[in-house]
Amino acid sequence: MRLTLSLVLLMLMAGCGGEKPPRTLDEIFNEERALPKLYFTAITQKRITAPATIGPFVDKETGEICWPALECINPQCPGRAADGSPFLFISPDNPYVAKPDGTAVPGNPDPKTVRPTGGQCPQCFKIRNRNTESAAVKQKYINMVIQHVLPESQARAKELEQERLKRYEFEKNAH
């Protein structure tokens, strides 16, 4: 009996010396959701990096609402930088207002901060004839606007994907 118990304990200790199990899928998902994201203030266009989970918020310094950065991937976009990088912008179409306590809540926004682009690139608006363009052309422009992802968040997302795959493999082998 004592020998059997000793062997079981030895096997358990040997198993503990290996790699620890990967984090849970929930832990990976929560980190992924909170990766840093670029935001712009609505009027001064101040750039702020904050967790992606917070959505629109109020910048304490300017009192302005911060909106997630969007990116136009249209190769012909007149807003492209000289180095070819995509045009970054915000689309504060939603009716949010800044409260005195620093939170952003639904309400009637200041008309200076609302840009009626429906999430489309304001620079591409300049080269489009929206009165005559087809629904397919309009959809093409809509599809060329994506959420901007910071390079460091993109790199970490790839690492998290690898971690997720390890977790799937761990769970598959545990059954």
Image (cartoon, rainbow, N blue to C red):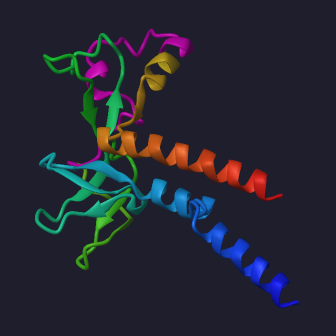
Residue situated furthest right in the rendering: 1
Q: Relative to residue 91, is residue 25 drawn left or right?
A: right
* Above/below status of 40 relative to 30: above
Q: Relative to residue 118, is residue 151 drawn left or right?
A: left
In terms of depth relative to the viewer, which is nearer, 149 or 98? 149
Q: Position of residue 7 (x, y in %)?
A: 77, 77
Q: Position of residue 107 (x, y in %)?
A: 38, 64
Examine the residues drawn in magenta and state their main secondary structure.
Answer: loop
* Above/below status of 144 relative to 76: below
Q: Which quadrant holds residue 58? A: bottom left
* Above/below status of 126 relative to 165: above
Quarter of the image with the N terminus in it: bottom right
Q: Which quadrant holds residue 4? A: bottom right
In terms of depth relative to the viewer, which is nearer, 10 or 97? 10
Q: Relative to residue 158, is residue 69 drawn left or right?
A: left
Which residue does the image show at 31% across and 63% down from the upper left? 57
Q: Position of residue 37 (x, y in %)?
A: 33, 50
Magenta residue span: 112-137
Which residue does the image show at 54% across and 64% down from the upper left? 27
In terms of depth relative to the viewer, which is nearer, 152 or 126? 152
Which residue does the image show at 31% across and 43% down from the upper left? 152
Residue situated furthest bottom in the rendering: 2
Quarter of the image with the C terminus in it: bottom right
In terms of depth relative to the viewer, which is nearer, 49 or 92? 49
